[in-house]
Image (cartoon, coloured by chain):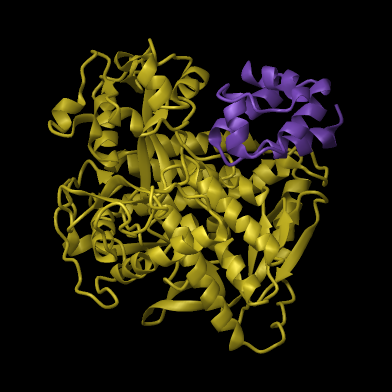
Chain colours: A yellow, B purple
Amino acid sequence: MRAALELARAELKVAVLSKVFPTRSHTVAAQGGIAAPLANSSEDNWHWHMYDTVKGSDYLGDQDAIEYMCRRANEVVVELEHMGMPFDRLENGKIYQRPFGGHTQEYGSAKMAMRACAAADRTGHAMLHTLYQQNVRTNTQFFVEWMALDIIRDPQDGAVLGVTALEMETGEVSIFQAKATLFATGGSGRIFYASTNAFINTGDGLGMVARAGLPLEDMEFYQFHPTGVYGAGVLITEGVRGEGGYLLNKDGERFMERYAPNAKDLASRDVVARAMTTEIKEGRGCGPQKDHVMLKLDHLGAEVINHRLPGIREIAIKFANADPIRDLVPVVPTVHYQMGGIPAKYTGNVVVPEGNNNESIVPGFYAVGECSCVSVHGANRLGTNSLLDLVVFGKASGEQVIKDARTMPGAHRTLPKDAGDYTRARLARLDSNAAGERVVDVLTDLRRAMQAHCGVFRFPDELTLGVQKIKTIAERAGRTFIKDKSKVFNTARVEALELDNLVETAMATIVSAEARKESRGAQARADFPERDDKNWMKHTLWYKEDNRLAYKPVHLKPMTVEAFEPKKRTY
Amino acid sequence: MEALALHRLKWKCRRGLLELDLVLNEFIEKRLEEKDLKELNELLEMEDNDLWEIVSGRSDRYDAGHGGIVARLRAV
């Protein structure tokens, strides 16, 4: 929506397609805030922020893109404020800022930077509303409850000419022809069984890109949140451990004392998630399946739980049937954020290898946000950098589209004669199959296989077996059928189409993870526990065709400053 | 129950928050009755965070006419 706003303000004709009402996209779940080195509450500058982001990425982030993002952070946050976003304020009227994990002063010193700007615990919600209202004002045209299905490319030069899309209301498929097509289709955390992601996060843009013959970048990197409610996935905020909550294994042992003697339960997300997984793997998990650990809060007392941790008690009671005032809450590391995605530049342009050029622009195609890999998050994202990513690169890609559009001829290119045939064939298969695999069965098997074979800790034999399993599941996904063949608002059909996208994303993830023989950021391999900069300081590119992998170098050179040399990442 | 109305309602239950997806999905699959349709449809016009606060019992800021459906959702 930030990109759409830029275009609409330039009086270009903009259509925004969305599966659900735009203010109900998953950005509403972002509570923590948006990072910007405004220095309202503590000394700060973009170069410190850049250092933290490069280090947080475990040196897989592209330093030019990171510099770009950090340098434009203040500008885009102030703009949001001017649009009316209700940020929390200081007494002097400036935007209030608070500390957040991984954000420091003076290049990783022990002093935390106050860098996160928030609108209570509803930052994402407030941002979506602000941007939606601005778009309404500028007459952006919204197509709500439309699902994009496939990309249309020019066979001559591969340029993207638009998409096919399904209108749920009628069941009809239309072609949207455009000079610029921008994806902001979000993540695909639903490929895992334990996921904090809403049901809509099915990696639709990623599936479309894979089917169009374009690669996906760094898909092995997913961030796990340590405390998702066992079985449901709903997130229990880090704040509970900040207030003194801690984790126990089946013996009632506070096991984090062994893994992180100083920080204990407050160690960084990946450290805690790995410790929990080790406990479970070694047979010290809780419950009949020994497949989770317990979060203890009861010693904090009702007062702290009710007042300092609003909403946590309700979540535990509803989804774990445990009242944290007296019960332990079962939790498990849960997939939260996808660092990889559609390979893009800081201008939003999608880039792919061609000949000797690793980053040749795909004309007419742009990607922003969780679906993209710019790559500012590298192998691990810092909290509050994702909302920043959306707004900075949303604006930047809008500016780029305007620039690119000015150099294009007035008329649209001619669509290939077979535009839309591929989509129609996919739908025809679903409409004609009278028997086959049930969508829900394939989906459940997919999510369980990803969880078992490509989780927090990755074991070589598990990965190899997992790749085989996902291949079998992909074949089954090609034989799905739906009972209900009706056209109007057929949600079964939509779910079958979403499954196709989840399958592509899962395949990209597990194949990329199996191939990367090192541990870096969110990828933790049992057989290669160390980061290997000599061999693996490079981005993965996965292609659907034959599950081919290619690699391209990380941009180690920032735009204007000295590079940050790789160091061991310790906190 | 009319299939089309049910389908529409089902899609309206796809939300931005996993918490709501889980509760609404469970409700639709196992508890939905004809009499819920109108009230639930109206309630689903709310924003995700506001709706979750109501469903989870942290807020009572809902229209008087929606008391019935709110109670049924809270019981999920």
* Residue at point 62%, 45% (across, down): A24
**Which residue appears farthest toward the top when viewing the image?**
A326
Q: Locate residue A186, reporting x and y percent.
A: 52, 53
* Residue at point 73%, 72% (across, down): A418
Q: Locate residue A438, reporting x and y percent.
A: 65, 35
Would residue A155 be found to the left or right of residue A507 on screen?
right
Would residue A477 be found to the left or right of residue B43 on screen?
left
Q: Is residue B22 visible?
A: no
Q: Locate residue A229, reporting x and y percent.
A: 43, 26
Whether residue A250 is situated above or below residue A420 in the rendered picture: above
In which quadrant of the rendered image does the C terminus of chain A lie?
A: top left
* Residue at point 47%, 34% (across, down): A193
Q: Locate residue A561, reporting x and y percent.
A: 23, 75
- State the residue in front, A8 or A270: A8
In which quadrant of the rendered image does the N terminus of chain A lie?
A: bottom right
Whether residue A571 is situated above or below residue A140 in the rendered picture: above
**Which residue appears farthest toward the front when viewing the image?**
A92
Q: Is residue A217 visible?
A: yes
Quadrant of res A49: bottom left
Whether residue A487 is situated above or below residue A131 in the rendered picture: above
- State the residue in front, A365 or A24: A24
